[in-house]
Image (cartoon, rainbow, N blue to C red):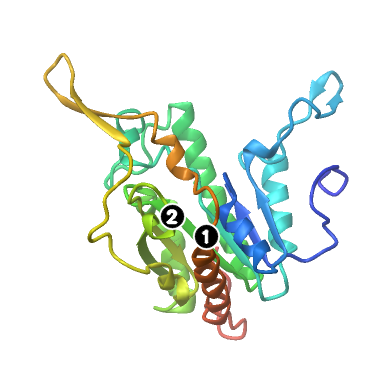
């Protein structure tokens, strides 16, 4: 099904970089500028208007990771990674895991699964669990995986994610997974935007290139108000959604991103099949 779908990447070629949940695809663009063969996947890339029909029904969105075709395509792109030398960047959809959504999702560090009877929460849980499967597949293919989230996300308290990290530790030891935090303002964002990421490469820490000391936000992304019950609440402004856009990619961003990619590949956690088994 995937191999006969028109409009996808050339599946006969190996890729150096795969970006899932790509959005504006800033990272993918930087890899292409640096000369890497990079692919990007996002649910928004599906062209519903020009999709074919079968038995009177439109084809499913093969960019949607919660669909069968979407997950198959995601796995295929991992397996098309350059042998022992590729990176999968997974900036998983964060809306359900962030602090601003806690009123709906009900998530916290102690209850990270959330109110899974809501469709949005259930789909986000599915996305995370399939993201974990992709990380395991990348590890098996000798690649580097990076899972990125905003600073307020409680994704890293999710039981399946904690189990995945524990299995990585049991198999590969204390250097199996690394975590770092950084400010997106250092990469051109109009607001500070604290982010964190996990990776099986020590060099993920090189994304942290400075503190926010002396930085003044150019926009206001959140407003505070008091509701009828007298409770202080917060709501996003019309500027919030635009913070994911970085405009023109600066040469500095390209340099940092390019060097980080090289180091990620050099310092990845390497599997020794003679001494261990893959995590299950």
Q: Which residue is mark 1?
A: 250
Q: Quadrant of residue 96?
A: top left
User: Residue at 62% across / 70% down in the picture?
Assistant: 143
Judged from this view, the residue extending furthest toward the left is 230
Say which element carries label 1: loop
Q: Is residue 233 above or below residue 167?
A: above
Inter-mark Cα distance, 2 to 1: 8 Å
Q: Is residue 276 left or right of residue 181?
A: right
User: Residue at 36% across / 32% down in the picture?
Assistant: 105
Q: Is residue 273 above or below residue 232?
A: below
Q: Is residue 51 left or right of residue 27?
A: right
Where is residue 117? Give x, y as percent: 43, 27
The quarter of the image holding the N terminus is: top right
User: Residue at 37% across / 66% down in the picture?
Assistant: 180
Q: Which residue is mark 2?
A: 188
Classify 10 Å Cα crowding around label 1: few (below 14), some (14-19), many (20 and above).
few
Where is residue 160? Give x, y as percent: 44, 53
Q: Are marks 2 and 1 in contact (CB under 8 Å)?
A: yes
Where is residue 49? Give x, y as percent: 77, 25
């Amino acid at each position: 099904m995937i191999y006969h779908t028109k409009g996808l990447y050339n599946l006969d070629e190996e890729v150096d970089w795969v970006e899932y949940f790509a959005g504006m695809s800033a990272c993918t663009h930087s890899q292409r500028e640096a000369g890497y063969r990079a692919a990007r996947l996002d649910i928004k890339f599906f062209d519903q208007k020009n999709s074919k029909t079968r038995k009177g029904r439109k084809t499913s969105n093969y960019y949607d990771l919660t669909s069968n075709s979407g997950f198959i395509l995601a796995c295929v792109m991992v397996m098309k990674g350059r042998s022992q030398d590729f990176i999968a960047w997974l900036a998983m959809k964060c809306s359900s895991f962030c602090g601003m959504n806690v009123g709906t999702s009900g998530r916290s560090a102690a209850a990270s699964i959330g109110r899974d009877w809501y469709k949005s929460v259930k789909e986000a849980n599915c996305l995370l669990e399939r993201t974990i499967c992709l990380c395991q597949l990348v590890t098996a293919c000798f690649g580097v995986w990076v899972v990125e989230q905003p600073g307020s996300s409680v994704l890293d308290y999710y039981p399946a994610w904690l189990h995945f990290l524990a299995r990585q530790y049991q198999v590969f030891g204390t250097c199996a997974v690394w975590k770092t935090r950084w400010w997106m303002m250092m990469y051109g964002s109009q607001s500070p935007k604290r982010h964190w990421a996990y990776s099986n490469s020590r060099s993920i820490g090189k994304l942290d290139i400075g503190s926010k000391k002396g930085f003044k936000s150019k926009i206001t992304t959140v407003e505070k108000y008091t509701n009828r019950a007298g409770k202080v609440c917060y709501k996003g402004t019309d500027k919030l959604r635009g913070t994911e856009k970085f405009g023109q990619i600066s040469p500095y961003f390209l340099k940092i991103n390019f060097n980080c990619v090289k180091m990620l590949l050099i310092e990845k956690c390497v599997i020794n099949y003679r001494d261990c088994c893959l995590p299950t």
